[in-house]
Image (cartoon, rainbow, N blue to C red):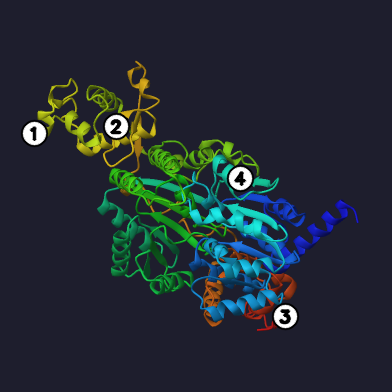
Amino acid sequence: MGDSQRMGDSQGMAREALRRYCGYDSFRPGQEDLVDAILSGRDVLGVMPTGAGKSVCYQVPATILPGLTIVVSPLISLMRDQVDALNDTGIAAAYINGSQDSAAQSAVFEKASAGRLRMLYVAPERLETPRFRDFAVHHDISMVTVDEAHCISQWGQDFRSSYLGIADFIALLPHRPVVSAFTATATSRVREDIIALLRLTDPMVKVTGFDRPNLFFDVITASAKAKKAWIARYVRSHPGESGIVYCSTRRQTEEVARMLAERGVSAVAYHAGMSPQERDVSQRRFVTDEATVAVATNAFGMGIDKSNVRYVIHHNMPESLEAYYQEAGRAGRDGEPGRCTLLWNESDIVTRRRLLESGDENDRLGPDEREIVAASRRRLLDAMIGYCHTTQCLHRFIMRYFDDRDDAGGAAERDVRSCGMCVNCTSTPRTTDVTAIAVAVSRCVHDLGQRYGVGRIVAVLRGSKARDLVERGCDAVPSYGVLASVGEARIRSVVYHMVSEGLLSISPGRLPIVGFGPQAARTVDPGFHLEMSHMEPERVDAVAPSGRTFGAVPGEDDGELFERLRALRRSVAAEAALPPYMVFSDRTLHDMARLKPVNDSQFLAVAGVGETKLARYGRRFMRLIAMDAGTQEKPETKETQ
């Protein structure tokens, strides 16, 4: 058999598996190339935005390859949901992690040894244990998949030292399996790190584009009090919609969750300070739609596959644009509209810089390497600050940051005026000329010899008469008091904006010093001009610019039927002890409400319905559709449950 024939056979098998298990007739952009490469025995690196279907790229090959696929996943708390979803589609999967006792783990090992598993999920730390290594070297491992692969890179926002041991584990196996790596967010530098540290062999690298055109992005400058008021107003105006509110501290998480509960919202808190049992209860309540809102720190959500999250609100600025885009990207994973709102103020920057300098040290790295990591994190934070301040299209800002060439069709180069899905393109933010303040700040930094921090610079510019300032002679510099009429918060805001523009820099350490940045010379140019923009909370409605509420889904489907199908989905999910989105996604229900299928072939034509879903759930959903249409015909299906 020739190579072309084998390729054709594998492609046919892959499409058949896609139809059978996932319910789709064709792959999304980028998926089929990755699947074909894996099935031909080639390593791959897939960089695809959240919601683009990364999991299909390794789950479909796992059903075809002869041996076991090991999936390395960073969060134990999410493995159960991922495994439950696979088993519900008919793909035999299991996990091994620290939440199981020895007997439970032995049962999984026995199942895998008997060839009754296609996929096995493990945390990276598990690969270093003698018991797992002994199991792996005596079994046929066809593929090792590394999910959230950016965690291996010190240049990324979520570096985890445990990922550095994955390549050594693979090297121990008697026959090297195909290695596939996937992530939603990775700059070119992070991609290089992934390839080198996982020791990928001539990998196919597929970057499908980072744009999420179904998401509306907005950035709102707000005080701490105004943030809570905005969140309460938005959440209460979207009853029944699933959403996530991210907070930077455990205390804020508890406060916001309590505030929403007091207003009648079913909300749960989730943070690392809770016990594993408490976190598990919160997560289960959220994924099963018992609670509509999860208020969480960034400990929540990596890899979560809850497809019907309609909005993600950030109560605080994240530490990087990678972290923000990954967290915000949990909205609209089903491809339907979603909203991503970032609420921030200058105190967020102060908090982030303090957390950055007091971050945990990694014992796998030497002093020089730790400083490299710290410097990288400072650059990541500067980019995040730039996102908050920019007046350009927010989609375009993100695309440029990730250096998106958009293999899928040029969205990264689209005209910013046609975006229509971010606040900067659909509203007129308040833009203020801060040139005079910026020039004064630059002169003050010069006058003080680049030897002081933000607080001292602000004090000098405002003409403070503080004793230590006078004793040091700071009241004698030319820039003393030149901004006496400007508020402290305003000057601080301009300082941090200048840092994001490269006009100033802030040194690392517990006593950060403000100095000149690489673009500092611009401030003495006669044509120098600097603007800042921000969107006041009261100027941003909880609806899309067109008047369509975000979370409402466009289309020609029957809205009332959709709600009845959603109610049936909740009942079916409760009986099966599954989250509702695992039964059918919102997109599938909308397609069902549009097509109104009443027989097997029609039901299989609904996006997201495969043979297993038809057999398990088809009769009940078609019966409801037939009753809604007044049809007396009884659906004929091969349902088994």
Query: Which of disc 2 and disc 4 is earlier in sequence?
Result: 4
Q: Marks 3 and 1: CB-CB under 8 Å?
A: no
Dot 3 or dot 2: first in sequence order is: 2
Q: CA distance from mark 3 to mark 1?
A: 85 Å
Tell me the mark number nearer the camera, choosing from 3 and 4.
Answer: 4
Of labels 3 and 2, the one closer to you:
2
Q: Earlier in the sequence, mark 3 or mark 1?
A: 1
**Residue type marked 4:** Ala
Residue to which mark 2 is pinned: 514
Nearest the eye: 622 or 314: 314
**Tag 3, which secondary structure?**
loop
Q: Residue at x 67, y 66 (%)?
A: 137
Q: Are marks 3 and 4 in contact (CB under 8 Å)?
A: no
Quadrant of residue 268 in the image?
bottom left
The crowd level at tag 1 (other Cα within 10 Å; few <14, some 14-19, many 20+) is few
The Cα atoms of the two marked residues, 3 and 4, are separated by: 51 Å
**Residue on which the image places disc 3:** 637
For the residue labelled by badge 1, is the local secondary structure a helix, a strand or a loop? helix
The amino acid beneath tag 1 is Arg
Q: Which residue is mark 4?
A: 196
| Mark 1 lies on residue | 467
Distance Cα–Cα, label 1 vs label 2: 21 Å
Q: Tell me where residue 142 appears, x and y as whole percent.
A: 71, 62
Residue 58 is at least partly visible in this image: yes
Q: Amino acid at mark 3?
A: Thr
